[in-house]
């Protein structure tokens, strides 16, 4: 981070009040192309004045949007959905240029975000209340759900499109004004989305992009006019946002880190397991909170499974995501070095390095942030390479003797985001889904990310608070209930109108 602007690089500015905002802040951070290892732009880092401007614009726009009819809000949602579908290729290129994931993976991320947009188009049904007539003589009772006001969304670098879209469409459809604080590592996608919302007809001020670092995060947490916070990121920061935000009376949903396990039983189809382990372990260079990072192999399958995975790794092409490669670079040089450090930690602790990603020869620039797929065997469960979230393309194998030992091992961990079992035994699968301590479970499915109508979120140190993302939990999070008890003594007459009633 620097305190002075470089005239050689473009500056990514905040989006406030429906347009690019002229900030007085002189703080910026570098944005890189991970496949080239070079700076491509600078992103503005918010100061206190920027935060106040963002909240002020959102607060000013909220009352009118809150009072806008469901029909008109839905028109904006449908228009945004159509525009996003038409131009998702352009957005995927932006994601690949700043995050590094391959284009096909970027398109997949956008598609999963589209699912939530489509879910949000049904908000008129999802947030409708109930009505009971004549609960007492001449008295009716009904319930409504109303928006919160100005809401904050703080999203991570690994999904610059999908994670914001877990929250933003639902919050907007429910009648809120949203301030998005994206990761400063790959910020451009958020500004692109903001412009698309405006083109879809969203009023100025209802969607704001506030770029920044901890100053911006703390500003949203502490601002009295921000009603709620949605956060996705590492566990320590998720805990901080949740504890600080709730202490200030805010509604908070905070999704943290993970250490996802795949339990492999002896009767499993090992080709399916090997394919799934490679896909779930190395997709997006392992920078997914739902990545499989540990295979728990119930003996005697470990040796055969490791060989099948090793063979598949040898065929993967690592390189620039714009060249049709299978796996791209990591997001920054520092993160690449941190992940590579876990390989050495595992080795020093006694693990066998079957495939060492530090030796990769990439199809890309020499200065890119490269680390190839890595496979570790017999990782000690006391090693930091096992207990900590690595968030990179490092897949470890732990061997156990029984199904029960495997369940106990998984449940002993600090995280409970997702877990999977691979087996052809229905009874074992049913027992696994009941006993495993994780919020999302896959049965012969390696990445059990729920569809938009269900809710995303883990257990234990993977989620703080009770509110999960999207689905009905998302609808309830961005609205609050009100119950009305009414008595009307005289009927009213609206006059004559022979026209067919319309939604306006």
Image (cartoon, rainbow, N blue to C red):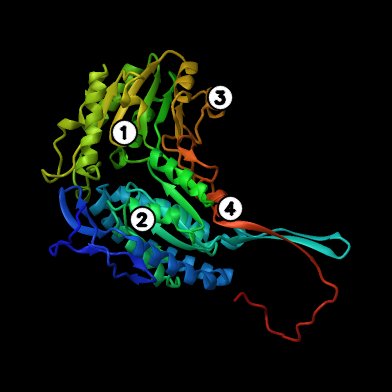
Task: State the SS at label 3.
Answer: helix
Compare marks 2 and 3 and give the one earlier in the sequence. 2
- Seen in the picture, residue 359 relative to 122 is either above or below; the reply is above
Q: Can you tell which of label 2 and label 1 is closer to the viewer?
A: 2
Residue 462 percent across, percent down from the top left: 45, 37
Is 321 in front, or is 252? 252
Count numbered badges in the picture.
4
Residue at point 58% right, 57% down? 479
The label number, if any, that marks residue 390 in the structure image:
1
Q: Residues within 10 Å of mark 3 (few under 14, many from 20)?
A: few
Q: Residues within 10 Å of mark 4 (few under 14, many from 20)?
A: many
In this figure, which residue is indicated by the disc labeled 4? Answer: 476
- Seen in the picture, residue 151 relative to 330 is either above or below; the reply is below
Compare marks 1 and 3 and give the one earlier in the sequence. 1
In this figure, which residue is indicated by the disc labeled 2? Answer: 216
- Determine the CA span between mark 2 and mark 1: 26 Å
Q: Is residue 7 left or right of residue 295?
A: left
Is 207 in front, or is 212? 212
Residue 167 percent across, percent down from the top left: 47, 54
In this figure, which residue is indicated by the disc labeled 3? Answer: 431
| Tags 1 and 4 touching, CB below 8 Å | no
Q: Is residue 431 left or right of residue 377?
A: right
- Determine the CA span between mark 4 and mark 2: 26 Å
Q: Is residue 97 left or right of residue 215?
A: left
């Amino acid at each position: 981070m620097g305190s002075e602007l470089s005239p050689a690089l473009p500056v990514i500015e905040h989006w406030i009040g429906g347009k690019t905002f002229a900030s007085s802040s002189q703080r910026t951070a570098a944005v890189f192309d991970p496949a080239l290892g070079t700076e491509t732009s600078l992103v503005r880092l918010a100061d206190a004045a920027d935060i106040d401007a963002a909240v002020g614009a959102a607060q000013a726009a909220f009352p009118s949007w809150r009072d806008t009819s469901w029909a008109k809000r839905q028109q904006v949602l449908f228009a945004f959905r159509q525009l996003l579908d038409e131009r998702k290729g352009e957005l995927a290129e932006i994601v690949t240029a700043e995050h590094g994931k391959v284009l096909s993976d970027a398109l997949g991320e956008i598609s999963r975000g589209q699912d939530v947009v489509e879910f949000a188009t049904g908000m008129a049904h999802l947030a409708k209340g109930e009505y009971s007539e004549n609960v007492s003589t001449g008295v009716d009772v009904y319930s409504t759900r109303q928006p919160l006001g100005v809401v904050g969304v703080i999203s991570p670098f690994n999904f610059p499109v999908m994670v914001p879209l877990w929250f933003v469409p639902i919050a907007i459809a429910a009648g809120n004004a949203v301030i998005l604080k994206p990761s400063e590592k790959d910020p451009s996608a958020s500004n692109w989305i903001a412009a698309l919302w405006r083109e879809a007809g969203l009023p100025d001020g209802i969607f704001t992009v506030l770029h920044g670092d901890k100053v911006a995060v703390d500003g949203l947490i502490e601002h009295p006019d921000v009603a709620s916070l949605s956060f996705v990121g590492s566990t320590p920061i998720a805990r901080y946002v949740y504890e600080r935000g709730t202490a200030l009376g805010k509604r908070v949903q905070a999704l943290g880190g993970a250490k996802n396990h795949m339990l492999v039983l002896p009767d499993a189809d090992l080709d399916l397991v090997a394919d799934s382990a490679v896909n779930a372990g190395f997709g997006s260079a392992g920078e997914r909170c739902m990545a499989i990072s540990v295979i728990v192999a119930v003996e005697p399958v470990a040796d055969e499974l490791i060989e099948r995975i090793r063979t598949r790794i040898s065929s993967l092409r690592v390189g620039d995501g714009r060249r049709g490669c299978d796996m791209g670079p990591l997001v920054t040089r520092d993160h690449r070095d941190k992940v590579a450090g876990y390989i050495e930690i595992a080795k020093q602790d006694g693990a066998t390095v079957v495939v060492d990603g530090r030796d990769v020869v990439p199809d890309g620039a020499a200065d890119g942030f490269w680390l190839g797929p890595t496979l570790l065997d017999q990782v000690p469960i006391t090693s930091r390479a096992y207990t900590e979230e690595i968030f990179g393309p490092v897949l470890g194998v732990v061997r156990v003797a029984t199904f029960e030992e495997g369940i106990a091992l998984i449940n002993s961990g600090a995280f409970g985001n997702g877990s999977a079992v691979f087996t052809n035994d229905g009874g074992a699968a049913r027992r696994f889904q009941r006993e495993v301590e994780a919020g999302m479970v896959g049965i012969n499915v390696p990445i059990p990310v729920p569809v938009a109508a269900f809710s995303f979120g883990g257990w234990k140190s993977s989620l703080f608070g009770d509110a999960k993302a999207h689905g009905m939990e998302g609808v309830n999070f961005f609205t609050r209930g009100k119950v009305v008890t009414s008595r009307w003594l005289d009927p009213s007459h609206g006059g004559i109108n022979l026209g067919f009633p319309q939604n306006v």
